[in-house]
Amino acid sequence: MSETNANVYDTVAPKMLEQYKKRIISDTHANAHNPQLINQAKFIISQNGFANELARNSMRLCHVYENSDWHSKLMDTLDIELIYANVDKMDGKMEEYTDNLVKELLRYFKNDFFKWTNAIPCSQCHDVDTQQLIRNERPNHEESKYECSGVEVYKCRRCHIETRFPRYNDPIKLLETRQGRCGEWCNVFTLILRSFGLEARYVWNKEDHVWCEYYSQYLKRWVHVDSCEASFDEPFIYAVNWNKKMSYCIAFNKDGVCDVSKRYILKNALPRDAISESDLWTVTAFLTTQLRDQMLGNEIYDLYNRDVREQLEWIEKKPSSTIENHNVPKGRQSGSAEWKSQRGENGK
Ligand SMILES: [Zn+2]
């Protein structure tokens, strides 16, 4: 009996795939313990400011959203019944359920839960329009309990009294204050996604914006999610609609650190001169490998395949000219006109 090509494939392919899988897993562990690779990455991190910033960001952003006490606290704060009732009303196949959940979370968060803050209202007359930013200062003893990065102090032109706007980073404190700008919004929204057991990344842009990504099991890819704009799967909005000039966009989560610039910087690219491309690759690979070394083999293999698919997605990307035709409003939605103009995000 002679074997046809088909049954050669049936017997050989699974064995080769098994070998391939073993190789991916053992390479990940070997790289995580390879002194040469470790020393090289550590040297780059010690010498290059940008690499150092990524490493410092990773220490927080790759771990902070994995706190199960925080997940429970957050779930107690949200109107879960309303959220699920709204998801049930949405059209779509069963497989799209979690995509619809994320869309509803974006709606709920922007409309019902969190507030955008240009200036903090006056604590006496509660007016915002009379408020003037007079200085930035360091947090006081009470404020510094909640990872406060700094305090904006406003003075009311009418009452002549000062009101403080502490910029908190502690997401649980933010569940109480429920206000801020993109930093606060993205911080809490990443925790929301994780609290619902959804896979999420925190995306940091060098030109002062942050947003999220959510891994859709339905679409089999990472999906751009911006809570400030209630935006789902519109990765072109910054470069195309806002006309934002950008150089680097880096994603962080418990599974790795990944340069996702190609998904977002479709035009208006600033020079990538903060670090050499090979050094950036070495650093992100080092940080990712360290995070994955403790994982089970199957998990390492699945994440590796996901990374490969993501790289292919960028290679096959449609030209940006087709992206400009998207029927979305020009310019950024969140923030005052003056603030957007200062940041070069008003679409002009
Ligand atoms: Zn006032």
Image (cartoon, helix red, strand yellow):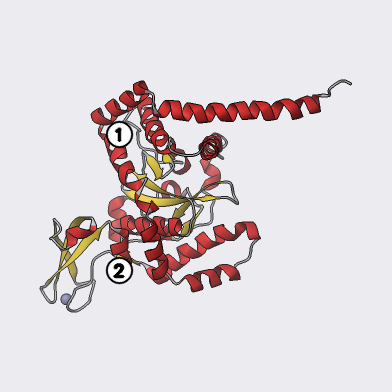
Q: Position of residue 175 (x, y in %)?
A: 33, 66
Q: Residue furthest right?
A: 1
For the point 10% across and 73% down, the residue is 160
Q: Position of residue 215 (x, y in %)?
A: 51, 49
Front in this rendered view, residue 274 or 218: 218
Image-based side of 212 in relation to 165, left or right: right
Badge 1 amino acid: Ala
From this view, report whether residue 80 is shown above or below residue 40: below
For the point 28% across and 41% down, the residue is 56
Residue count near mark 2 (Cα–Cα under 10 Å), binned few <14, some 14–19, many ≥20: few
The residue tagged 2 is 176
Front in this rendered view, residue 343 or 247: 247
In the image, which is nearer the foreground, mark 1 or mark 2?
2
What is the quadrant of residue 168 in the picture? bottom left
Q: Position of residue 47 (x, y in %)?
A: 24, 28
Image-based side of 50 in relation to 98, left or right: left
The residue tagged 1 is 51
Local SS, label 1? helix
Q: Position of residue 89 (x, y in %)?
A: 59, 71
For the point 45% across and 44% down, the residue is 264
- Say if residue 116 shows up in the picture: no
**CA–CA distance in space, label 1 to label 2:** 34 Å
What is the quadrant of residue 94 in the picture? bottom right
Q: Residue 299 got which mark? A: none
